[in-house]
Image (cartoon, grey):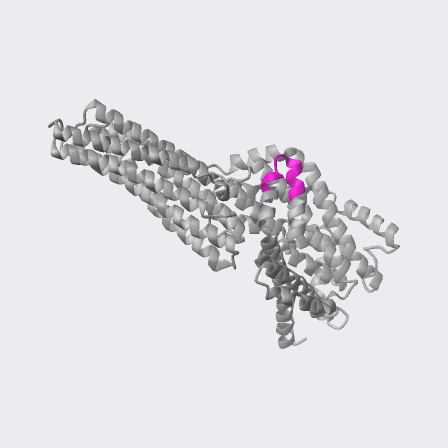
Amino acid sequence: MNTFEIITLILKLAGSLCMFLFGIKMMSDSLQKVAGSKMRSILYSMTSNRFKGVFTGILVTSVIQSSSASTVMVISFVNAGLMSLTAAIGVIMGANIGTTVTAWLISLLGFKVSMATLSLPLMGIALPFLFSKKDKQRSIGELIIGFGILFIGLEYLKTSIPDIQSNPEFFNFLGNLTNNGYWSILIFVLIGTILTIVLQSSSATMALTLVLCFNGILPFECGAAMVLGENIGTTITANIAALVGNISARRAAFAHTLFNLIGVIWMLIVFFPFLRGIDYFIVKSTGVSAFGDPNLEAVRLAIPIALSIFHTAFNLINTFILIWFTDSIAKLVTWVIKDKNSDESFRLKYITQGMMNTSELATIQAKKEIVFMAQQTNKMIVMLPQLLTTDNEKDLKPLGIKMDKYEEISDRMLLEISKYLASITKSSEVSAAVADRIIAMLKIIDEIERIADRCYQFYREISAKINKKITFNEAVTKELLVMVEYTQEAYSNMMKNLSEDYHKIDLAPGNNIEKKINEQRDDLRTMNAEMIRNNEISFEASSSLNEIFSTYERIGDIIQNVNKSIATVKE
């Protein structure tokens, strides 16, 4: 085989893998679009205990055909505060079992049935779906096409790998790697790990492993070793996603790595007896040994089935053993990865530009980040009565530093969340419901930032009041504090609305509080006018008082604007 033929062969292999990966991604993305909201409710309603978490992981990964996607989804939920670390570990365990479905799909259909010949007619069925006006039906069409592309890619992969008899020199190096006893097993574990890291898909590496074994290039034990390596390599995707996540996301990703590493270590200890047990089952079932002559077609058909059994049995047993230690694993990863972030420094807590997400999941993260932004701004709301009752520059200074800091955080969070929401629409096609949610969220964060601006403006008004040595009598201060109380009540109601389902919002409580704020403003306006007529207040003090209660009233208006923006989301 000359250099040109080798380069052509490598490119054909790469192209086949590319097609297979594209099919997997298309299937996964379309399934998440079809079942996005349902899958979301499944994930955070069925993880109340470790066993439900495992079942959920199996279900979701079996459906979307990608453990990487479901694991990153889980990490996104942990990142968004929708799932505890312990629950996430259970779901990740289940995802490891769910991903074995891909191997069975390939083993049972990819080698015994020529799915590639059925793929084009199948994709033809999908054509009318692509022209549908309904998002869900278009996603179903994409799902069918992804399924077809997956098997076309697998067929090309099978035919791209050269025959070992026709090209013995090309596979001499593999012969040297497979004849070193236990060292060969460790080498192929490493190869499986590296391939999965490079391809960013355990499904693609599994397909390649099954094809190599089916073509007689790798023996059963080396294929099994590559499967173990894939279990390590698949954790890299989650860790890459978590690098730009928060502390909880990094802990969940590390727990995934720890879980798979522990499994690989104990499996390597019992490796050969375990394989002989699987082979005994294969021989009893089919009369053919997976350790038999790879030149025989019956043996080559048996090896993919044996590898699928190995993959499933390994993940089932590993989960059964470690599920009892989820709390211990959670404590260990919490101890290893410590939180060093300061509360008063700028950071996004939930959303991350590096996360792989569908628009459904991305808006969940954005929603949690908006709540966090509102919590940060609430620290300014809480300081309003302190500012109001401060009458000297010494006490005002530390409050001013904090107000300045939180106002800056609000500005930066507005910018970053806006960029993130814009990126959702750019990265994937969004449904009408998601588009409405994004528009509402953009309005909401703009209004929250305006609240922060008004709070900072209030600090400046108090600062000017102190500099001018203006003081209010006890009656005025008491009335202003009542207005502050109403403002805080309005903000608490807004926070409740932001945290719950947008489409279930009740505007009545917010309207009632805003009415009380307006009435209190009118009372203060009347009081101010009376004091001017009675020469009980100077013009400067009257002007300062007017600015202060007007600012309160504007904050109340903006808070209700947030509630109204939330109410625009219908589902």
Instruction: Residue 280 in the image: state x and y as whole percent.
Output: 84, 48
* Residue 387, placed above or below residue 4: above
Whether residue 346 sits left or right of residue 105 in the image: it is left
Instruction: Residue 557 in the image: state x and y as whole percent.
Output: 33, 41
Residue at left 36%, top 40%? 559
Residue 14 inside the magenta-drawn segment = no
Residue 47 inside the magenta-drawn segment = yes
Q: Give the range drawn in magenta.
A: 43-56
Q: Hey, which residue is sitting farthest top in the picture? A: 474
Whether residue 169 sits left or right of residue 358 in the image: it is right
Please name whichever residue, 251 or 150, is drawn nearer the observer in this view of the structure: 150
Please name whichever residue, 400 or 313, is drawn nearer the observer in this view of the structure: 400
* Residue 340, placed above or below residue 1: above
Location of residue 153 (image quadrant)? bottom right
Examine the residues drawn in magenta and state their main secondary structure: helix
Quadrant location, the N terminus: bottom right
* Residue 452, placed above or below residue 396: below
Please name whichever residue, 359 or 301, is drawn nearer the observer in this view of the structure: 359
Whether residue 570 sits left or right of residue 146 in the image: it is left
Residue at left 50%, top 44%? 503
Residue at left 19%, top 31%? 528
Instruction: Residue 324 in the image: state x and y as whole percent.
Output: 66, 33
Location of residue 494 (image quadrant)? top left
Residue at left 43%, top 40%? 371
- Count of numbered badges drawn on the protein: 0
Whether residue 253 sits left or right of residue 264 in the image: it is left
* Residue 125, placed above or below residue 463: below
Please name whichever residue, 273 or 245, is drawn nearer the observer in this view of the structure: 245
Viewer can see residue 542? yes
